[in-house]
Amino acid sequence: MPGGLLRLGALAGAGVLAGCVLTLPRLPGSRPVQQATCVGNACPTAMVAGKDTPHPKARPAIGGAAAGAADAGRQAPAVATVPDTSAGLAGPTGPAAEITLGRTIASLGDVTQPGFWLRTPLVERRRAGRVVWAQGGNSVAVTLIPIPGDKGAGSRISLAAMKAMEIPLTALPELIVHARAAP
């Protein structure tokens, strides 16, 4: 029997390589196999499902009732929402709550330093702030940390802040830097 299967596999391989239609014999109790025709090097990569193809069944809805017509007119149960406490994600801020410090080109900072921060010459003291990716518009709340240098010198941003704004890690993004206004 194994020798017969080996010969059958070799015949099937030869048929595909030759670009021929090959009809394989059916084993008793098996489902019919659809034929595929290859032309040159172009062969179909997937078979089309027929009426005998098994399909997944719908999962029962919450509470054990089957999904579909049995649930018509029923409302989904209320879901409690929890406020997002993700550190560093910017919340709503207005112009009165922030001061725009300027723009800077940032590179990825020390990846061993956790948190959401921007080391920049745009601040003279450590303070809370927010950066906006000029190209993408995404923003994140950060701690602004002063570094020596001219205001036009570049900045370094944390890995977490770059990921939160979906900035490619090898990019040199232009950032708009805002500081939280003193109360």
Image: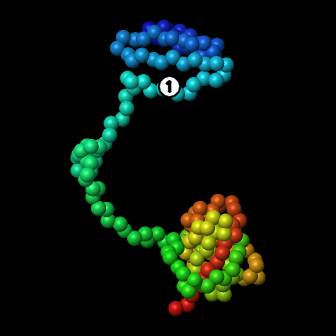
- Quick check: 56 above or below 87? above
x, y percentage for residue 96?
A: 56, 86
x, y percentage for residue 183?
A: 52, 91
- Quick check: 101 above or below 7? below
- Quick check: 62 above or below 163? above
x, y percentage for residue 182?
A: 55, 90
Quarter of the image for residue 95 reads: bottom right
Residue 90 visible, this angle: yes
Quarter of the image for residue 146 reads: bottom right
The secondary structure type at the circle numbered 1 is loop
Residue for point 48% across, 18% down: 34
Is residue 78 shown left or right of residue 83? Answer: left
- Quick check: 150 above or below 5? below
How many dots with numbers?
Answer: 1
Considering every residue shown, the one lying at the far front of the view is 73
Q: The N terminus is located in which quarter?
A: top left
Display colour scheme: rainbow
Residue for point 54% across, 12% down: 22
* Residue ID for mark 1: 47
x, y percentage for residue 2?
A: 46, 11
The amino acid type of the residue labelled 1 equals: Met
Considering every residue shown, the one lying at the far bottom of the view is 183
Residue for point 29% across, 56% down: 76
Residue 111 visible, this angle: no
Label 1 crowd (10 A; few <14 / some 14-19 / many >=20): few
Residue 141 vs residue 1, the one in the foreground: 141
